[in-house]
Amino acid sequence: MQSKVYLGIDVGSVSTNVVASNASGEVLGTLYLKTQGQPILAIQQGIKEISALIPQDAEIVGVGTTGSGRMLAAAIVGADVVKNEITAHATATLRCVPGTRTILEIGGQDSKIIILNHGVVTDFAMNTVCAAGTGSFLDRQASRLGIPIEELGQLALNAKTPTRIAGRCAVFAESDMVHKQQVGHSTSDIVAGLCEALVRNYLNNVAKGKGIVSPVVFQGGVAANVGIRRAFEEALGLPVHVPEHYSVMGALGACYLAEQIKTVSTFRGFDVADADCQATGVSCTGCGNNCEVVQFSLNGEIVAFWGDRCGKYGHNRVVASN
Amino acid sequence: MVTIGVPRALLYYIYFPMWQRFLTDLGCKVVLSPPTNERILNLGTQATVDEVCAPVKVAFGHVLDLADKVDYVFVPRLVSVEPRAYICPKLMGLPDMVKHSGNKMPELLSPDVDLSRGKMSIARALSEARHTLGKSVWPTLRAFYLSLGENHKVEQRLMSGLTPEEAFHGTAWRRTPGVRMKVAVLGHPYNVYDPVLSMSLIEQLRRSGVDVVTAEMLPQHKIDVGLQGLSKELFWTLSKKVLGAGLYFVKTPREVDGIIVLSSFGCGLESLIADLLERNARRSEFPFMHLIGDEHSGEAGVVTRVEAFIDMVKGRSEHASNISSHGNLQHRPTSTT
């Protein structure tokens, strides 16, 4: 018998993640790829690689997309469900860690907090003004210090006396770190201070005023950083759980959301990995808005439009086409 | 015939019917600037000082848009429209900012109205307008008295759920069938109804099958209910309405399923009001979201948050039909009939 498989794709600013799960919700394979400013290539690469991780005779019965590039991903693969990141993350976490009350999620350029009660989202927030508390900032600081990002967390754990780093703003944090270096603090103390600053910034800006209740789950790419995790535990005075698939929870949530569809999947097939995908920006001159409309074509055929405010092009929007 | 340009910005969303009647009765031709678009936003941001909020920049853009099409641009300086309450100082400063921006600027018709100092300020404002336009006393007074009733005429349409734009210009929106929820969108009217500053928030909600209610669609007595019990009377006219409406919805939770507050980055008034509302909403476990806008043109951030908010409200109401917010199974009284 053919096995039924669901696909979830999360296209974020930094990483593009793909997850495949079977009918009983078990994860068959996960991929964490760098988007590197080329989401189309990353999505195609992800589709190609995931096909190797699932059974040969598998039938794709549902595809979900999420993340800031969810429209693009949906157009490429022919998705059945297109969902925002909050709902996707909450869905995945509730399945993996039932009873979760708080989700701390820190990704490449977004960070969010989701408050749950009895398995229902009751409140959420995303970062507003600044990306100081997110993964790309950590990435940048790690490369400035010449430390591979993977080792940053371990280094922070070795610190004896973490220094205080200004965490409100990425620019201030950086100049503060340079200053602490020049004064002679050890790198591990500075990195530990950076972790604390990031957590402080997150709790003050994103989680501002929200009641954080145990069980707390920490996910997103930054959850790989044990230094941040410990800083969270210390700041909250609560244990912080990092789930197994922490870095691809959005994609996993998209997978689970795809399970809810009742119709035949509109998935275009794995061939799209080699298809000629073209997204062209068109500046509409119909009115003073000058919308930057994106026209998306697959093998020379226009399949979707988005980016127009008035809906003039949106009528031709064929996200799900056979 | 003298043509007068009215910028479709700031207090236009409150007073336009009155202004239009007054100016038309005086024998002027009223030219309204188009709904805000990227071009107007760009015009405004390039001409203004950095400190002001995006709505003032947008208003500046509208003034510039009208500049070479009209004889005068109407930018009244409303200091106060009721005793012991004021309009935001950044809004008051607009006529001066326009005059002193260094750009080639249109002639302004900008009477001062300050009712905190008594009703005489109306007489002075009328006399100023009259002299600029070269009109005599009686026609001016007559036009003014006739204009006073204009805002009441649109009230009915506002109360029926139309936005000021729809109420003023007689357009209507078609309700999406199968509406399952109602969300309050609160904020200063020049943010909430501006298609660029709000990133078409109301449109987006309505398209998603959500009914929208705003402070302007609420009768005054409900806003007064909301304001009851505040430890101190607010002295900002525009924020009073936002806070009153918000607190009313929190006090009578059956009226809407959630509240979205939309404010501008750098708005001092809203930074207090939104926080006050958020605390009250949270205490009552009421779905609440605060969106802060600026000069962004990328809608993605707003779209994601609004979608998530709709999902949250849906999830909560589906859940609440089974279990109360306190976690116990809801007690269903057995029917005795």
Image (tube, coloured by chain):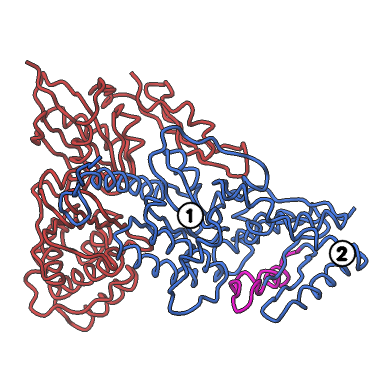
Chain colours: A red, B blue
Q: Position of residue B303 (x, y in %)?
A: 40, 46
Q: Which residue is mark 1?
A: B296
Q: Position of residue B42 (x, y in %)?
A: 60, 55
Question: Among all residues in the image, which is located at the extreme top?
Answer: A1
Residue A52 belongs to the span the image colors magenta:
no
Magenta stretch, residue numbers: B79-105
Is A312 left, or right, of A127 in this rendering?
A: right
Dot 1 amino acid type:
His
Chain ID of residue with mark 1: B
Which corner quadrant of the image does residue A81 belong to? Answer: top left
Q: Give the numbered dot on residue B52.
A: none
Q: Which residue is mark 2?
A: B140
Query: Secondary structure under badge 1?
Result: loop
Please identify, in this view, whether the residue under mark 1 or under mark 2 is nearer the observer: 2
Q: Residue at x 20, y 46 (%)?
A: B332
Question: Among all residues in the image, which is located at the extreme bottom?
Answer: A183
Q: Mark 1 packing: few (<14 Cα in 10 Å), some, or many (20+)?
A: few
Front-lying residue, B50 or A214 = A214
Q: Earlier in the sequence, mark 1 or mark 2?
A: 2
Dot 2 amino acid type:
Thr
Question: Among all residues in the image, which is located at the extreme front?
Answer: B337
Q: Residue at x 15, y 67 (%)?
A: A232
Query: Secondary structure under badge 2?
Result: helix
Chain ID of residue with mark 2: B
Front-lying residue, B20 or B50 = B20
Disc 1/disc 2 C-alpha distance (Å): 42 Å
Is B42 left, or right, of B320 in this rendering?
A: right
Q: Position of residue A310 (x, y in %)?
A: 54, 37
Above or below residue B27? Residue A283 is above
Above or below residue A123? Residue A234 is below
Above or below residue B72? Residue B101 is below
